[in-house]
Structures are given as C-alpha cells and as structure tokens.
Image (cartoon, rainbow, N blue to C red):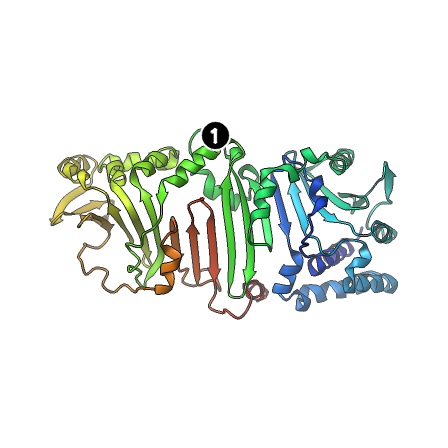
C-alpha cells in the first residue's frame, strides 16, 4: 500500500475520532471485552480534548483533508467529508468514551460502542473497497477484519474491538491475534474489568478528560521510574496499582493520583506509610520567600515515619550513610508536627521541623567525634547551633524552642523576616498531609506554578497553572507546540 495514502487515511480516521468522541452518562457496557487482568486501562474524552485545544482550527485537520484530496477519488472524498460532518454515519456511538487497554500478554486493544451495526458494516465495506482493510469475515454472530493488515478488529451489534498484536518488537501471528480478539468478545462478566476494584477506582475519579489505570509493571516508564525506587522492600512493583484522572481547564490542568493494591497485605503496608503523616497545622505558613523554587510542608509522626522510611531500601541506605556521623534516626523520631523543606532558586536547601522532644541533643558531643572520623567537621557556632562542613559544603544545624533548623545559612531569628505570607495558600495547606508549591521559573514553557497536595487517604492532587487564566491550558500547550 502506498505509504502516503496509508498515513493520510490513518490521520483522517484519527481526526474523526478526536473531533466527535465524547463521554456518555450511560454505563459503558462495551468495556466488558476488557479482561479483569488488564495491566493498563485508559478512558479518553477525545471530543473534550479536541474542543479545549480548538482542534477545529488545527492545521492537522486542514492538512489531513488536503492530503486526502490528493490521494483518493472525489466520490470517496465526499463520503469522508460527510462522515466528518456527521460521524454517526459510521454507526459508532459518538457519545461514548474511547477505552484503550493492555493485556498481560502484550496485546493492546481499543474498544468503542456501536450504535448502528448495519451502518458500521457499510462503513467497513467502504474501507475494504479502498483496500484499507480486508473483506469482512463472520462466524457465530461476530464479524471481523484487519485494518492495514496489522490492526485486527471485530464487531457485533454493540461493540467494536480493535487489537494490535505486539510482543516486544515482534508481531504475533494474525491467527493468534484473531483468536484473542474473538475470545474477548465472548468474555463472561465475572472475568471482565467491570467486576473489579480497578474499574470502580477509575469510576470514582473526579477528572474526566483522561482517566487511566496502571499496574506499576505496565505504567509508562516516566511514571514508574519515579515510584519503583521508593517501594518498601518485600513488595513487587507488580503488586502496586494506580489510577490517574486529568482535566484541562482555563489557566490550569488538574490531576488526581491514587496508589492502591488488590492484595490486602500490600494495601496494609501502603496504609501504614500514609498513617505516618499527619495533618499540617500551619506552623510554617508565613515562611515562603520570593526566591523559592520548591516549598514543601507536611505533618509527620516521627516515630512512625522512621519505621516506614527504613522499609525503603534506597532511603534506608541513605540514612545509614548519614548515621555514620549524625544520628539522623533519632532526629526524625523527635519530629512531631509540621516539617518544611525549601529549595531556593540558587539551589540552597533549608529544612525546618517542629520537635516533640530535643533528647537527641544529648548526643551532640558523640556526633562531633564520630563525624571527625569520616572527614566531617562538626563544631559549635552559637547557642545550640553547629556548623557542619563536608565535601566542600557548609551546613548549619540549630535547635531553637523545639524547632529544628538545617540550612546553608547560619540561623538567626531574623533569617525569614523577608518572607511573604500568602493568605490564599492557608486554606489549601492547613489540614492536608502534604503540600508542595513549585515555581518552575519558566523552565516548563507556559507553566508558572505547580501545586501538589495529599490528603489522609493518600490521594495526590496536582495542579499546574499558567499566567493566562482566560485560555484553556491545553490550547496554550498546543499553540506553544505549533510554534
């Protein structure tokens, strides 16, 4: 097949899907073809994304139409234009969301609801007449074909299922893909995703533009790589699951992320980690300097936190290295309340924490001796303040009225007098278990602020904001990409 012809046709099919697909209020019964052991599932409101990105005026739409005019006859072009104007002519339910999924044996599938199977079969026959798909086969009420010889699809009166046969870089046999596809079309409800907690967790997500479920083993590497190193020892990353919901609004993008496990023992470990956090009381709300790149506050139960941190091998190794010179374990145990971490625009790091006790100060003399053995200079430089010099860097360690300070500037009560107080942040911070304020300083194009919060259930919420609150953030991103 002519490559340009194939690419143009693929673009047109994508355009039709993006321009007219939207979420339905009805139960998406056609997702019954997704197996309960699917390692990844995504529901996408493509029409919402198209509208928010102003896809109607996108160069991609114009380019696709022009390419088609050069490659197909006038009669076919008229049919394509008619479908773009009224996609219901394909027989596909244009009000239903599109679902994509991955099976444990590396099949990737897409399922959509069919509203008029006769119209859809006529649409498929039209594709076949243009040599875009094979002739339709039929058996036991199921009909199937192959698009471009490598994307199998089958349909009945309710469901369209497309499968791509991937196994690493090697394609599976067409027969195996067809057998898999037809078996999924006859999947019993109890073996379908609709009967699982993962589907219930997806359904609970408040953000609808994009929703997804991943077993961590199948999650995109950009996500999985940030989590795998911080999984408690004894737990396989295959035991961790997550759901994500994303929505694009004027001036901001919102996302919600929830980690969970279908295995009670693993879920218990995740709950224990969440319970080591406590609600932020707001001790450090007034400390938000103008030159802060990252500002993170959390409520901590130090006794529980150190227990949970030592279950994570990477953090455990880091704590062991620090303990060679300073008893970081007892410092963390002493924290009982708010903790604050700040990173300035010149990459200076500051830590503040509310202490339940200062018993660890009794070991300062021992720390100074043990630190010297490892080439660390630990010396007094004020009342309950010490200077730590190692690897060419200097840190200051101070305790003042049950507040711990560790930073790269010598502590004085006036150190944060230049801080600003943002009343708008107060309601967002107090009561959360975690609050993170990131100022990218134009490192990410149009994004000028990122806020991450976590509640007592362990759910993470993320908000990315732009200075332009009148335009949809997706439109701004697409416009930036076009440039």
Residue 77: % across, % down: 83, 63
Q: Would residue 4 be seen by someone viewing this image from the given angle?
A: yes
Residue at the image point whose x is 84% and y is 62% from the top: 79
The residue tagged with tag 1: helix, strand or loop?
Answer: helix
Q: Is residue 441 above or below residue 120?
A: below
Seen at 82% across and 52% down, the residue is 116
Left or right: 130 in relation to 93: right
Q: Position of residue 90 (x, y in %)?
A: 81, 55
Q: Quadrant of residue 24?
A: bottom right
Q: Nearer the viewer, residue 142 or 386?
A: 142
Image coords of residue 225 (percent x, y): 48, 42
Which of these two is toward me, 59 or 55?
A: 55
Q: Is residue 174 above or below residue 466?
A: above
Q: Give how far across and how far down residue 301 sits, in percent.
A: 31, 41
What residue would you read off at disc 1? 265
Q: Residue at x 27, y 38 (%)?
A: 333
Quadrant location of the C terminus in the rendered image: bottom right
| Quarter of the rendering containing residue 164 | top right
């Amino acid at each position: 097949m002519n490559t340009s012809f194939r690419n143009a046709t693929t673009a047109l099919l994508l355009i039709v899907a993006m321009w007219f697909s939207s979420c339905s209020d009805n139960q998406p019964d056609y997702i019954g073809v997704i197996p309960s052991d699917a390692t990844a599932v995504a529901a996408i409101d493509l029409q919402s994304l198209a509208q928010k990105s102003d896809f109607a005026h996108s160069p991609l739409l114009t380019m696709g139409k022009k390419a088609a005019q050069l490659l197909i006859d006038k009669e076919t072009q008229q049919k394509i234009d008619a479908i773009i104007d009224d996609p219901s002519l394909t027989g596909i339910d244009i009000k239903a969301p599109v679902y994509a999924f991955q099976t444990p044996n590396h099949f990737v599938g897409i399922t959509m609801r069919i509203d008029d199977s006769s119209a859809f079969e006529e649409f498929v026959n039209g594709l076949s007449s243009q040599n875009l798909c094979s002739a339709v086969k039929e058996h036991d009420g199921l009909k199937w074909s192959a698009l471009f010889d490598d994307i199998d699809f089958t349909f009945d009166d309710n469901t369209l299922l497309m499968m791509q046969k991937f196994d690493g870089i090697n394609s599976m046999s067409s027969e195996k893909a067809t057998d898999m596809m037809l078996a999924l079309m006859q999947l019993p409800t109890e073996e379908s995703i609709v009967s699982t907690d993962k589907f219930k967790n997806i359904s609970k997500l408040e953000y609808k533009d994009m929703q997804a479920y991943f077993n961590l083993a199948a999650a995109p590497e950009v996500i999985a790589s940030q989590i795998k190193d911080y999984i408690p020892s004894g737990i396989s990353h295959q035991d961790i699951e997550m759901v994500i919901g994303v929505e694009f609004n004027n001036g901001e993008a919102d996302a919600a992320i929830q980690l969970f496990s279908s295995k009670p023992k693993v879920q218990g470990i995740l709950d224990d980690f969440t319970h080591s956090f406590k609600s932020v009381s707001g001790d450090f709300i007034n400390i938000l300097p103008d030159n802060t790149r990252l500002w993170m506050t959390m409520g901590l139960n130090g006794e529980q936190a150190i227990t949970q941190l030592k279950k994570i091998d990477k953090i455990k190794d880091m704590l062991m290295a620090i303990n060679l010179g300073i008893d970081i374990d007892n410092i963390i145990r002493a924290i009982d309340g708010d903790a604050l971490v700040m990173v300035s625009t010149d990459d200076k790091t500051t830590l503040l924490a509310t202490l339940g006790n200062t018993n660890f100060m009794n070991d300062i003399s021992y720390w100074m001796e043990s630190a010297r053995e490892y080439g660390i200079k630990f010396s007094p430089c004020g009342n309950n303040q010490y200077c730590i010099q190692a690897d060419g860097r200097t840190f200051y360690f101070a305790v003042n009225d049950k507040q711990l300070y560790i930073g790269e500037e010598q502590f004085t009560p006036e150190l944060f007098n230049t801080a600003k107080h943002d009343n708008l942040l107060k309601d967002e911070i107090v009561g959360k278990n975690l609050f993170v304020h990131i100022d990218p300083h134009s490192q990410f194009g149009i994004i000028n602020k990122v806020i991450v919060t976590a509640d007592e259930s362990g759910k993470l919420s993320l908000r990315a904001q732009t200075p332009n609150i009148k335009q949809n953030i997706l439109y701004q991103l697409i416009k930036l990409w076009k440039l």
